[in-house]
Image: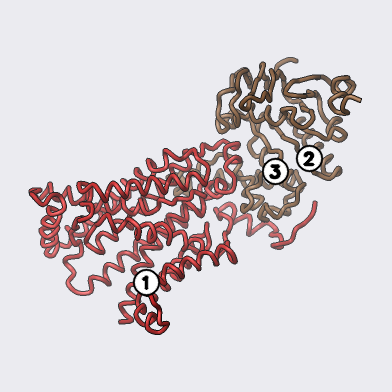
Amino acid sequence: MIYGLILNILLWFGFYLIISLSLNMEYGYGGIPNFGKALSVLVGAIVAGGVVTRILIYIYHIKIGIGGFSTATSAVSNEVTTLIAHNPLLGLALFLLTLILAIIIGCIAGAIFILPSARLKEDYLAITLLAIAETFTMICYYNQSIIGGYYGVSVPDFLAFIHTNRGVVFTGIVLLIALITFIFFERLMNTPYGRLLRAMRENEDVIRVYGRDLMKVRVMTMAVGSGIAAIVGVLLSYYTLRVQANSFMITGRTLWTFYPFLIILLGGASNNKGTAVGTIIFVTVMEVIDFYKTNIVSFLHLPVEAVWLEYILFGIMMLLILYYKPEGILPEKPIITPAIKKAYETKKVSKKGVREEY
Amino acid sequence: MKDPILETRNLIKFFGDVLVLDGVNIKVGRKTITLIIGPNGSGKSTLINVITGFYPATSGQVIFEGQDITKKRPYQIYDLGIVRTFQTPQPLKKLTVLENLLIARKHVGENVISALNYKKWSEFEDELVERAFKILEFLRIDHLWDEESYKLSGGQLKLLEVGRALMTEPKLIIMDEPIAGVAPALAHEILKRIVELKNKGITFLIVEHRLDIALRYVDYIYAMASGKVIAEGSEEEVINNPQVVEVYIGGG
């Protein structure tokens, strides 16, 4: 029982670490309020459920019959899963292909996603990104030709060759990808690029005076952030082996936009380690509530289901953080490039917090 | 004036129906300090914003080194060697003083792809850090290098603005009220530094209110009122001009 809880915490830690790190780059460092974060996850899911499945249908000559695309994916998924059961390499190739495709398409989608709004100031930008993401999700829900709409599509199990402990192996893969993502962002942010992002967040006018094309920086940043976030969409699809547009409607907005923002604010914006700390705390609380929900209901004599408790608690948590500790658990630190590291080692470091008058 | 580095030709700017710049013609001589004075609302800051591309001009031209830059965007104007400071200092608050200076220069490591290749930009970063420390020493705020810039006092922030402008090795620095709200002793310090930099070959265009301090350091003065240049020339010519006396003292 408790073993399952721990495994679940680790798995969702992996999912949330990847998406929160990418949002941390966009929002924590760059100040781009990406309220349409869930869209990038949807793009990843579309690649797994709508693009790769089509490629497979083409390769294995599956006929799209009266049941439409949705039914055809079930057929092709069954066939490919059977093949993978005897051929692990095929499974891994399928997984890697999907990942790479998702990153590429995610980058392109992210860049296009911000184009209409790249010239707007922060508040309008947030609303526009939310609106574009919602519109696109609606289109995917009502148009069955993309990922089967309400009915959804099936994806093959790339781990079909593993017969026992599939969950453990899958969690291991997710954690490995999360670790690589963490290293990637730590390296990418401790560069002049990370510094430029922080400067852009602090004051856009200054950046324009000093010769930077804001639009270019925003487009570049959203491309990377969305490309990485699309990985989560792929992982989720292979976790549930289903892709359904309605899982990106109301719950998707909460899971993949609101929660990552909460994690960043909790852990400390513009700090990757803070994001990791925020993720582990958040995911543990979320999973423990989910695990003990029946006990909580009977113990507290709640008139509602305990899952709703989660939303209430997280809402309160966000308000408390914003009010009492807006800088989060681990506050922001300067960008450390090799040259700046040397300066900290050789120059006299002033006493922190001492304000010296000229 | 021979060989002006910057020139505006009949610059007109409307905000809706309000005429803010009414045919402004100014010339800024190379390697000089040019001062623009004028009461509140005379259009000084708007003039700067139009020159640096923050506001589009309604009509007229801005010429920099013989090139028409009227339609250029702020980041393109930077590439020509013009940099400006703001009326209220605009520090990047959460960034340290050193980082505030480093951001002034375009950097090879600012692209996602090149950023990951540390070798490509490390050398340039070393040079920048060295240069930044030299500038901080010149401005005598090097002891504050690792402080977050929101902790600085008003005067120190003004110096930080100047330092950031110097990082770019500019040809022309346009300053909007560099000594407003600064104690007299520090104001003189800042202007002395500006004169030193002028002697090193940088041109300055300065908007300032505090004539008592600013006048003695500058080479040429324009007085503006209601969007027009009403007087120009040396210190004596301008402050003895009856029209200038009129707008400053208020028609007594």
- Label 3: how many Cα within 10 Å (few below 14, some 14–19, many 20+): some
Residue lying farthest right? B252
Q: Looking at the picture, do discs 2 and 1 lie on one chain?
A: no
Q: Which quadrant of the view contains residue A352?
A: bottom right
Q: Looking at the picture, do discs 1 and 3 lie on one chain?
A: no
Q: Which residue is pictured at 75% across the width and 43% down the height? A: B138
Q: Which chain is brown?
A: B
The residue under label 2 is B180
Residue lying farthest front? A303
In space, the residues marked 2 and 3 are separated at their CA atoms by 10 Å
Q: Secondary structure at mark 2?
A: loop
Kindly report which numbered mark, 2 or 1, lies closer to the viewer in this rendering: 1
Quadrant the N terminus of chain A occupies? bottom left
Report the amino acid beneath label 2. Answer: Ala
Report the amino acid beneath label 1. Answer: Val
Q: Earlier in the sequence, mark 2 or mark 3?
A: 3
Q: Which residue is pictured at 64% across the width and 45% down the height? A: B101
The residue under label 1 is A307
In this picture, residue B121 sits left or right of residue B36: left
The residue under label 3 is B89
Kindly report which numbered mark, 1 or 3, lies closer to the viewer in this rendering: 1
Q: Which quadrant of the view contains residue A88?
A: bottom left
Q: Is residue A4 above or below residue A212?
A: below
Residue B251 makes an appearance in the image: yes
